[in-house]
Image: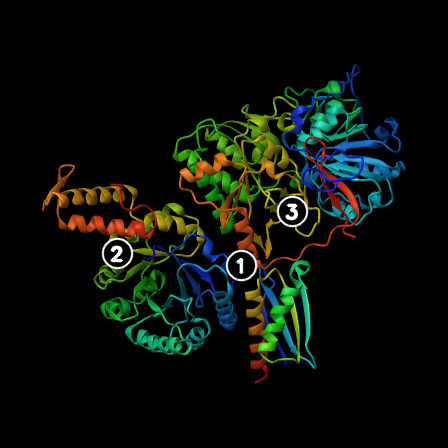
Amino acid sequence: MLRSLLFVPGNNPAMIQNADVFGSDAVIFDLEDSVHVAEKDNARNLISEYLETYPVLPDVVIIRINSLDTPFWEADLDAVVSKSVDWIMLPKAGVEEIKKLTLKLESIEKIKQIEKTIKIMPIIELASSLVDLENIAKQERVKGVLFGAEDYRADMGIKRSDTGVELLYPRSRIAVVAKASMIEAIDTPFVDVMNDTALISDCHNASALGMTGKAAIHPRQVMTINDSFSPPKDQIEWASKVMKAKRQADEKNLGVFSLDGKMIDKPIIARAESILKIAKEYGIGGEADD
Amino acid sequence: MNIGIAGSLESNDALVTVKAADTTKIEIHSIVDVFYHDQIEKVVKDVLSKKKNDKIHVIIEDKGALDYTIKARLLTALARMEANNA
Amino acid sequence: MTNSLGRNVPEGKKPFVSSTDYKSHKRQQIGLKTQAEKPVFYESLETAFVDLSLHSGMTFSFHHHLRSGDKVLNQIAKLIEYSDLKNISLAPSSIFPQYDLSELIRSGRINNIYTSYLNGPVADAIQDGHLKGELIMQTHGGRARAIESGELAIDVAFLACPTVDLNGNGSGAIGKSACGTLGYAVSDLMYAKKVVLITDNIVDKLEKYQFDHRFVDMVVKVDSIGDPKGIVSGTTRITRDPIGLKIAHDTALMLEALGEIKPGMSIQTGAGGTSLAVADAIDKLMVKHQIKGSFASGGTTGFHVNMLKQGLFSKLYDVQCFDLEAADSYRVNAFHKGISASEYANPHDPKAIVNKLDIVILGATEIDLKFNVNVTTDSFGKIIGGSGGHADTANGARITIITAQLMRARIPIVKEKVHTVTTPGSDVDILVTERGIAVNPLRKDIITKLEAAKFKFVTIQSLLEIAEKICGKPKELPEGKRQIGVVEYRDGTVIDSLYGSR
């Protein structure tokens, strides 16, 4: 599970070689918007050499390639795909594009003898992709989607609001479809990088609807995002208590039991389990001591 | 033109220029020359020998780039030179 | 001869023993002179110069509170040449790039230099081997100690003073060249054989002043002592560099884990962008935990002033105002106190603020496996600064933290051995880098606390390894041949030697 995904421009050595230090769950090396059309070759070589030789890489490596309607995407993949790459992020994605990308990845994996299956994270930034989301999410390699609010607004011809009300529907739809398809729902980056307070509320808006993580466009956003998408401390403590009570009940062969005067039933146990699982994964606590 | 240029003069980057020549000539101007001259030269030589290229003039203007950056910039410069020739 | 750190010490000099050795020596103070007569006022520096009956071989001192705006040292330099003085020793508290003394150094007019911080053309001329005598780099506290003990005997102190009254009292708080406190010059004022205040603003009577007329021999009125733009930098800002911010954030979290964000805490940070980011991160934690500290000290900026105003600290002890807000606050706020270099950092001053510090956050150009820190030369061996208060605060504070980027443009900051030792490793406790925090093994108490708090840290060896894995192992710098001077520890012993570039 990825809480924070940090974007890093693909042609900037100073930023690339420090990308792993900021504590993001994943780093997205960008070959698209942050790289000038005349420098795509430079960026491809830079990222490919970095991934091949750098002694410390981020835990999860994502490459954002250029969209399939550009002349760049195949060369992007030929240059950078290696065993160090975990995901390809695909802009302007629809089912057809994902299928095409899958075929290309299969062929590169074969040629380069890469044993793992590289995942695909489509960017949902068009109204049409949002409509077709169930089909997109069903594609075999699609294990997560990124919501791209800027392009979504442009496509819809709507403006940004202070409350984020225009994002209510796309976020809700993405969160629900992603949950049903058991994939990750990554929220759009927040562009006002110096405004911490607004970032916190934007994170809460997204996580309240069920988005599971968020992209960052500046390293200083990473910690806030990690905190916002981790289960809060009191929730972890509560979940630990529930599980402890459950074990005690099991020992006594009790089917139903109560905790602090409240009945604990199956859905509550399931929620507690899922909170603890996430907490453990993020290394922020887990089972309480017995 | 028998020339290829790649990279920049930003900190941690290098500007690499390659020109067709009669023999191999490697010119290194680096802010960390006293510490890493040999290592930079080795990166360049390794790339050239892998590409079997022994007729080239390489000029590196280095602002503290790591090996992977120097190698990437050199590869791009060589490819750009080839593309210019094509 | 080598000292206890294995560093070369020129024959005839006292080698560094340890950072606690000074405690077994008594404070030495030469007698204070008493000035019976009123100071004499001059309208021209030239006339004053003649009346001082100066001769070759003398020692002149200066302070650096006007920073890169200072015009006094250059004016005196011209007069040294005009008066055909030779073999002069110069003792400015710092030397900045606007001073061009190269010609005077080459021609043997200036032969020895004592200072606490040095960069620019003067540093280059010395490293090129032009200084006939030697360069002695002192700490801020060590300079005060050397002056009061007579070890550094000053014949004339030429002290820029933004405002002087008709009695000869002086203040830095007001005037067109106002710069705030004049703390670094107080030892010069008290112990120099002759004291000349150089001002561009004379008033009838100062109610508050830092320079007492009883020590003043002459007051000289000139058109301008400094360029206000260079005296105080505009606004000092928190860094926006993501690595600096990360280091600052991690430093604050570590202090929280150590239980150091607590009522009554005292702290000193520098005025650079990363230091301010650390101060900012600590500020936020103090607000979050509703902590009120006792004091912040050192060079002061608007940022520190805000912390005082917010009530996060009860006092600021200020040796140097870095910006206008700091200078203004020094003028109007009774809790913003100016202190002298001796009260700040003299190893023998019983009141020294550095000894009351809980935490100091410092920088480094290099740090080695024994935690020795270099802020005097860069990795190429070029002189780019000096201790200032580095070694003083590191020695005095209970916890000394170095914050530094592990690599800059391929150069690892952690070395097996630093090029120059400014501050001994025995006084340095923690290194915070973007790739991990290392604790000096001598500080078992800190290690135990961090372990108990489950706070992650690494060995400094592993930081060196990761840096060299990323950058490659740098070649050894060729040994410098000609000794050009020494770095003194705060007690005046030689902690390291300085070498010429040729």
Q: Which residue is mark 1?
A: A14
For the residues tagged 1 and 2, is the chain the same?
yes
Label 3 to label 1: alpha-carbon separation: 25 Å
Q: Which residue is mark 2?
A: A168
Can residue A207 be seen at all in this image of the molecule? Answer: yes
- Along the line of sight, which residue is nearer the eye, C174 or A285? A285
- Along the line of sight, which residue is nearer the eye, A56 or A223? A56
The outermost residue toward the front is: A251
A186 on left or right of C112: left
Q: Nearer the viewer, mark 3 or mark 1?
A: 3
The subunit letter for the residue under badge 1 reads A
Residue A69 in picture, x, y percent from top left:
38, 76
Tag 1's secondary structure? Answer: helix
Q: Which residue is mark 3?
A: C418
Tag 3's secondary structure? Answer: loop
Q: Nearer the viewer, mark 3 or mark 2?
A: 3
Q: Nearer the viewer, mark 1 or mark 2?
A: 1
The subunit letter for the residue under badge 2 reads A
- Residue A176 circle label: none
Tag 2's secondary structure? Answer: helix
**Amino acid, disc 3:** Val
Label 3 to label 2: alpha-carbon separation: 57 Å
A59 on left or right of C184: left
Residue beneath the point at 43% across and 40% down: C451
